[in-house]
Amino acid sequence: MCGIIGYVGPREAQKVVIDGLRRMEYRGYDSAGIAVVGEQGLQARKKAGKLANLETELTAQPLASASFGIGHTRWATHGGPTDGNAHPHLSASGRVALVHNGIIENFAALRAELEDEGVGFDSETDTEVAAQLVGREVDGGADLADAMRTVCKRLEGAFTLVALDAEQPDRIVAARRNSPLVVGVGEGEMFVASDVSAFIEYTREAVEMGQDEVVDVNPDGYAVTDFDGAPAPSKPYHVDWDLSAAEKGGYDWFMRKEIFEQPKAVADTLLGRFDPNHQLTLDEVRISEVELKTTDKIVIVACGTAFYAGLVAKYAIEHWTRIPCEVEIASEFRYRDPIITPRTLVVTISQSGETADTLMAVRHARQQGAKVVAICNTNGSTIPRESDAVLYTHAGPEIGVASTKGFLTQVAACYLLGLYLAQVRGTKFGDEIATVMAELESMPAKIQEVLDRQDRVLALAAELRGARSVLFLGRHVGYPVALEGALKLKEIAYLHAEGFPAGELKHGPIALVEDGTPVFVIVPPQGRDQLHDKVISNIQEVRARGARTIVLAEDGDVEVEPYADVILRLPRASTLLQPLLATIPLQVFACEIATLAGHDVDQPRNLAKSVTVE
Ligand code: M6R
């Protein structure tokens, strides 16, 4: 939701902080701010709007040289995106500067308590309460880490906090509960940040922070404790990607770069999944085979694009395992009292591993005794840490707010999970599993073929740039693809777009079709899918009402030709694997139409990459 960074070391703190914020701006871009401590004491600058506004401010009012500092890029929750509400917030004495990601739920009571003591507030944020409380502790003589621990014990909700004290130099203290925080370990320098992209330029050695922990960093090292001050075990790891993965590499947008990274992302997700005995393996499984054999229901829980990946996966998982599979939006899940038992397997899908709604679903499911498998792209993030098993998608960092390679790799990972369950439960023979795996392994080359055909899609975007509304139709696994195509268009092109099951249209939504309405239709494989002809009928229904039909059909399918105004061809694939191809032209289309409209594709309005509040 917000991106936060802290630095201590020999480099110019301002540069490290601003560069880190630039790489994390996808997490929030309503305002940005920095505080450093140098020879002139604590200095802070903050500005509403994107990071560029802060940089302009820093040019107008430069900061003195400093070797430690903190920074923040914000997605507003409490208080609008103004200069005053931007972080860092300072304590009343001006000693402490603090940045925050999350929501402090009991801030109103704490603020009232401080106001009763005569503390004045400069902002409408929940964060300022934490800054004032930490300030009150250090003013009273507390060590900064002790102050942080004392304050954290009083806070409710979700928070990552990073603070510095002008009178305790070369030291930064950070804390986390329900919000991400990672430590970067350099040589004679240390970093804390919301994610590793903030410091990947300087070090690939990182340390996972556990729940309810405080880390105290100085240039020579770090110490992690729980909120009571007891040492906590730290979990160092090496980041398996480098700076180039966090840069645009010549593309105009991260989104476009990430679309083009999909062949590799899917290949990496599939890599090395068979052990020497030709058995499929997951990354970390703390669930026994007996438990997997007695599972009587699978519930997939996720948000947004990850939810649509789950909808695709349901078809494959039920087909291969014969276990009933439900797919649920995470923010709805625990509030409807779902029927979850120890025999339910809950599968969460999350690119970031930090989505608060999904995390709360994990906790709820485990409280009910269910086992949870996390499908996640972010090593060591909270959701996999709190799950019973993990299957990582190896997509590399996804920085564009609109998820692209996240979706394809999530579908691929769900399929691996489905095949793994089929293997454990014996619902598929080994050679059947190997056949599906072989087809999966052929997909990266086919994904590349789809990308090689992008010119047709780019031309289409130019042609349809004035459209007011776009519809997407699909059946079976094509239906979630239609939903994903519509979501992409909504979130980056700000266009009205809807995805429907093609057969459902005539039950109401067909009234939306006007003369010239663009309707994308995903057509199942010809001759190998019972729904092929039905979808052709659905195309005719909308065409008869004036729709401009854009048909995604596989190579050689001539039956669609009379009914298509435009055909976007896909390489041949089986029905269940077609989403790995059919989604791509829809991603390219949304990216291009948003670019032509002059939108900031990577930082669409009102959105943030990781949604770490409920
Ligand atoms: O990090 P997650 O996969 O848990 O994120 C879930 C959704 O917030 C995310 O997919 C969102 O819908 C994207 N902006 C879609 O492009």
Image: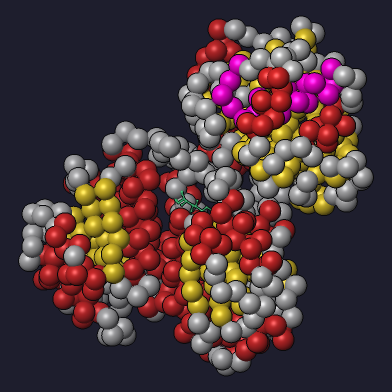
Q: Residue at x 32, y 43 (%)?
A: 493
Query: What span is colored magenta in the figure?
Result: 122-139
Front residue of 108/211: it is: 108
Q: Position of residue 308 (x, y in %)?
A: 44, 63
Please, is residue 461 above or below residue 453 in the view? Answer: above
Q: Residue furthest front?
A: 116
Q: Residue at x 49, y 26 (%)?
A: 81
Residue 169 seen anywhere in this rendered image of the structure: no
Q: Position of residue 445 (x, y in %)?
A: 46, 66
Q: Position of residue 218 (x, y in %)?
A: 86, 29
Q: Residue at x 33, y 47 (%)?
A: 490
In the rendered image, which quarter is residue 38 located in? top right
Front residue of 324/369: it is: 369
Q: Position of residue 580 (x, y in %)?
A: 43, 67
Front residue of 516/612: it is: 612
134 inside magenta stretch: yes
